Amino acid sequence: MANTTLERPIRIAFLVAVLFGFQCAVGKAGHLVAGLFDYSRIDPYNAFGANCVHHLVMLALSLAVIVTLSKTTPLNFHFGTGNVALGKKFTWIFTAACAVVAIGTHIMMKFNGNLPIYGFPLQGDTIAGTLGFQLLLTGPAEEMLYRMLPIPLFVWAVESEHKSFIKIPYAVLLAALIFASAHMKWSFSPLGVQAEPFAVLYAFAMGIIQGYAYYRCRSIIYPILMHSLSNVLMVGTGYVCIALFS
């Protein structure tokens, strides 16, 4: 028993380091590949083209590892539809809450005189491109990398599906911590980190909510929908506010 108790934190710490390193490497690979192409013909304002390629690389690399692990280990990554009724409930409640938050946030921004400023004109092609990117790529790429890959691995590492003291499964909590870390700017020579506290806390909260949805519904479909729809709502609300008030 003592040996098992000692091995578990070592296994978890090792897995945290490996997953964090892999997620950083995937992000850098995405930027590297995205930088190889010229988007001027379809995206002259650099509004969405590079982001699309970056997330496609993230999606491809994450899915390759997940499929490999699913075929070589007994881990269950839940490729199916899972608990459909619960998944719909998570999706609708979360999306409705995000709509309220998006509208409320932009109303406050309007009254404070700090509506979003975009580095591109809000015209048909840029609006369609950016919203299409948010809808079709952000959810699949990020949910597979930050939820579908780490949570089953952490369930294995913890050797339990028990919940932490805040009633959240340890696997979900650990995955959310790594997701929040991905929203910090890390440098290793010299060693340092920069972070915007609100962005990190927001990412951690989203990691908990979407990770819990994946964990409970046993399907990545619902976190993908939650992620993509919330992004579209937030970005789209900003566009509407600019159109109405500028």
Image (cartoon, rainbow, N blue to C red):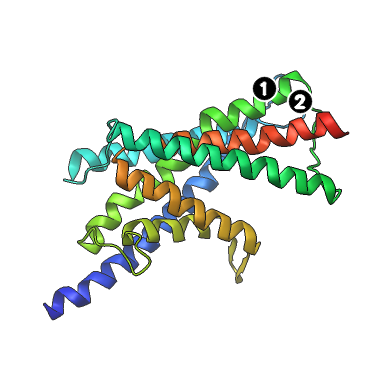
Query: Which amino acid, by three-letter code, is at mark 2?
Result: Pro
Left or right, 186 with respect to 141, comes to right
Q: Secondary structure at mark 1?
A: helix
Q: Is residue 136 above or below residue 158?
A: above
Viewed as shown, does residue 4 lie left or right of 99? left
Mark 1 or 2, nearer chain start? 2
The C terminus lies in quadrant: top right
- Say if residue 140 shows up in the picture: no
Where is residue 162, by image quadrant? bottom left
Does residue 96 appear anywhere in the picture? yes
From the top left corner, tell me how far across and down residue 137 is, in percent: 52, 31
Q: Position of residue 195 (x, y in %)?
A: 63, 63
Mark 2 = which residue?
44
Q: Which residue position holds label 1? A: 128
**In the foreground, 204 or 12:** 204
Q: Residue at x 79, y 27 (%)?
A: 122
Q: Secondary structure at mark 2?
A: loop
- At horizontal 54% and vertical 47% (from top left) the residue drawn is 28
- What's the amino acid at mark 1? Ala
* Residue drawn at point x = 28 percent, y = 50 percent: 152
Mark 2, residues whose alpha carbon is within 10 Å: few (<14), some, or many (≥20)?
some
Q: Name the quadrant containing residue 69.
A: top left
